[in-house]
Image (cartoon, rainbow, N blue to C red):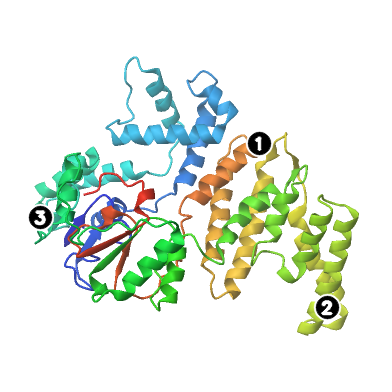
Amino acid sequence: MEVVFGWFLDGQTYPETVSGAPASFNSAVCGPAKLLNLLETALGVGAPSAGRAVRVGEYLSKLQACDEGNFFFSRSLEVDPWATAQELLELRDQLIAGGWNLGAIPGNHKIEALRSVELAGDIGFGPAERLIRINSELKRRKKSPIQLIRLASEIEALPRLWQQAIQNLNELGTIVEPVRPQPHNAVNSDLQRFKAAYEHVRLAEGMSADGSLVLIDADDELQASEFTAAWLAALRKPEDLVIIRGGDVSVLDEACFRYGLPRIGSQTESPHRSLLQLLPLALELIWTPFDAARALEFLSIDGGPLPSSLSWFLRDALKRQPGLGGPLWEKAWQSILIERRAQLTRQGKIEQNKLDQSALEDVERWQEWFTPLAKRDDVVRASVAETICRRVEEWAMRRAAVQEDHDFYELARNHAATLRKILTHYTTRVMTLHQLRSMVESVISEGAVSNFTEAEAASWCIVDHPGQIWNTANTVLWWNFVNTSATNIR
């Protein structure tokens, strides 16, 4: 097997295959996550990986189980358990990646405290531990599962464990060599002058405006999008183009559409993305005093628990009389009950004598979302939050079963299931609003970047980071490059 390995090559890359052909066999372009999975599979040491939020929950359980109030983190654990567990897990993983084998270090009370936590039980392996397991297995083997590794990142710049893994593969017979991009013909081009100046931190001199390096400096995004789309439309060979999405491209997508071009695909725009906010908003509704603003957001979710044909009654009541349980609020629910019965009558799927009961059951199910269960300056039991998670799971599963575009419903269900799993590890079984919000943020931020972008088939190639271009590209369009946080670009 032949592998191209680079630190940024998880996700979309250019070229997409090792050979540059549209498809390839027994070869792969890999970043650290993909190569980790590939080696685990080839060596037979793989196991279901735990998400970061789940690992934080497991580690929090261990911290609370062993803490007797005399550790360096005890006070922080008491004030903000979740944030403390996040910080300490990050510290633990970094120590392991740096070579700590969970042993004692004389005179270091922080390491001794972390050792005590390790004795309280196991948690899911992080990337460092998975790589350590791979390195141990490689030392037992007599033959490498990979014939050739071409490095798109300098080996000296890789973390120590990855350097060890590549060395172990090399000792088993894997050929390790750097990627050698094809030299550019125009040695004295503006692009080459700029590259030389950038590498030596000096001003670029002798620029001739030969077109090899062009900066589009527009007054606003609309103007830049219009110019860029016109330029794309004029390209003779769009298959030689690589586009780096350096941020939101929704405005550029609209300009492309006007010129009859395929959409590049925005990562932030989707008609169903608001569904991912249903879990945090549902948890906000269990606290008193009632937050009318959060309730309006909840009721405005397209595809949410209440049909839009009914939720407007409650939205109107909240705008005119913010609060829960007032006269307009109660009147809105009565109107919803009447309208729901009329809807069921028009559908004709329920017997006449069961219409009232069926409409009432629907309304009672919707009312459960707005039942206050704890005061904002108090704590809430973990079991209460688990109930909300189950409610979100059930709603998402019902909708996913009947919706063609069900990806976001599946993701919302996964978020709720993950949070519920974390709550089972919460030893104290009570939490403040701040702690609950921190947990939800961790769960939703992990993998919340949508993979359901609406990119359309095109001749060009799209990447999200300049480091994902691992070999020579004839033309690169870096959209919105001024806002990038990219570092260590080859």
Dot 1 corresponds to which residue?
Answer: 432
Residue tagged 2: 342
Q: Position of residue 393 (x, y in %)?
A: 61, 59
216 and 134: which is toward the camera? 216
CA–CA distance in space, label 1 to label 3:
63 Å
Sequence-wise, the earlier of marks 3 and 2 is 3
| Circle on res. 188 | 3
Q: Secondary structure at mark 2?
A: helix
- The residue lying furthest to the top in this view is 107
User: What count of labels does the image hold?
Assistant: 3
Looking at the picture, which amino acid does disc 3 mark? Asn
Image x and y of residue 384, in percent: 69, 46
Horizontal and vertical percent position of residue 182: 11, 60
Q: Name which quarter of the figure residue 188 lies in.
A: bottom left
Q: Amino acid at mark 2?
A: Ala
Residue type, mark 1 in image: Thr
Using the rendered image of the protein, determine whether residue 259 is visible from the camera's viewpoint.
yes
Q: Residues within 10 Å of mark 1 (few under 14, many from 20)?
A: some
Q: Nearer the viewer, residue 274 or 155?
A: 274
Single out the mark in the foreground, 1 or 2.
Answer: 2
Few, some or many C-alpha atoms within 10 Å of disc 3 (few <14, some 14-19, many ≥20)? few
